[in-house]
């Protein structure tokens, strides 16, 4: 039982760690040298169902999860498996909060009357008010300012 709690804690810590990684990479990569891909996400007049160059970041962020889950299964390494599941859980949270609730991607619109979710949306829309590489604020995806 204690082992299971340990691995759940590792998964939760992985979610928190991924938000830190996402904030830093959003600020210093996506709004830095990776702007060539990320600017597609800041263009207002587009169909929310369409592919964006920014979607290529999915490959970058999902790779560690895939590696950890596969390695964890192949070698019965539950630490790696827990980390991979935590990163995967962060990805699912990101898709639901950011892509669906904030941007209505994939032709889906989900609106819940929860203060935390309203603050996430407001914070991210403030981020999107800046259409340039420099000058944006609020780089978190599941946290807000």
Image: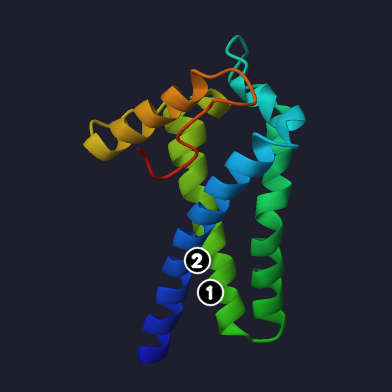
Q: Nearer the viewer, mark 2 or mark 1?
A: 2
53 in relation to 77, above or below:
above
Residue at image location 41% in from the left, 83% down from the top: 6
Residue at image location 30% in from the left, 33% down from the top: 119
In the rendered structure, the answer to whether residue 50 lies left or right of residue 90 reads right
- Residue 97 position by quadrant: top left
The residue lying furthest to the top in this view is: 45
- Residue 39 position by quadrant: top right
Q: Position of residue 105 (x, y in %)?
A: 54, 27
Residue behind mark 1: 82
Residue at image location 57% in from the left, 49% down from the top: 24
Residue behind mark 2: 14
CA neighbours of label 2 inside 10 A, class few (<14), some (14 to 19), many (20+)? many
- Point out which mark residue 65 bears: none
In the rendered structure, the answer to whether residue 64 lies left or right of residue 98 reads right
In the rendered structure, the answer to whether residue 5 lies left or right of residue 78 reads left
């Amino acid at each position: 039982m204690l082992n299971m709690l340990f691995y759940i804690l590792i998964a939760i810590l992985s979610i928190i760690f991924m938000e830190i990684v996402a904030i830093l990479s959003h600020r210093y990569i996506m709004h830095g040298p990776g702007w060539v891909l990320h600017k597609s996400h800041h263009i207002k007049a587009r169909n929310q169902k369409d592919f964006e160059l920014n979607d290529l970041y999915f490959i970058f962020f999902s790779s560690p999860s895939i590696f950890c889950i596969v390695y964890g299964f192949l070698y019965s390494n539950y630490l790696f498996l827990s980390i991979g599941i935590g990163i995967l859980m962060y990805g699912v949270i990101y898709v639901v909060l950011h892509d669906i609730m904030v941007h209505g991607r994939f032709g889906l619109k989900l609106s819940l009357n929860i203060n935390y979710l309203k603050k996430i949306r407001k914070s991210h829309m403030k981020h999107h008010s800046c259409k340039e590489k420099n000058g944006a604020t609020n780089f978190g995806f599941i946290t807000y300012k």
